[in-house]
Amino acid sequence: MTPLNARLSSDPGTVAALAARTMVGRNGLAEDFAGAAVFLASPSAAYITGQSIFVDGGLSTH
């Protein structure tokens, strides 16, 4: 839920439908992306190239 998707997040039915499509059963929050961003910006990710990392609660499996 961010200002970018405020229109969608203002409709409880849409919010519930989107959450139901994820494996974790909820919609993502801005802080859900922090761990991946910190990891990718850290020395631990120095040897990672050309990868897609899905931070979507399992939505992409549908």
Image (tube, rainbow, N blue to C red):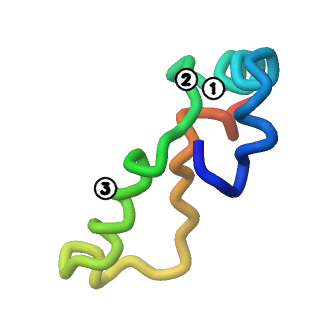
At 53% from the left and 38% from the top, the residue drawn is 28
Kindly report the distance in space between the C-alpha atoms of the residues bearing marks 1 and 2: 7 Å
Along the polypeptide, which appears first: circle 3 or circle 2? Answer: 2
Vertical placement of residue 18 versus 25, above or below:
below
Q: Residue at x 57, y 64 (%)?
A: 52
Is disc 1 surrounded by few (<14), some (14 to 19) or many (20+) residues within 10 Å? some
Counting from the top left corner in percent of width and height, residue 62 is at: 76, 29
Label 1 belongs to which residue?
22
Determine contact: label 1, label 3, CB under 8 Å: no
Is residue 9 shown left or right of residue 11?
A: left
Q: Which residue is mark 2?
A: 26
Q: Is residue 31 left or right of residue 56?
A: left
Q: Which residue is mark 3?
A: 35
**In this image, 14 relative to 47: left or right?**
right
Task: Name the quadrant containing residue 18.
Answer: top right
Label 3 to label 2, Cα distance in Å? Answer: 18 Å
For the point 41% across and 45% down, which residue is it?
Answer: 32
Front residue of 39 and 4: 4
Do callouts 1 and 2 mark residues in contact (Cβ within 8 Å)?
A: yes
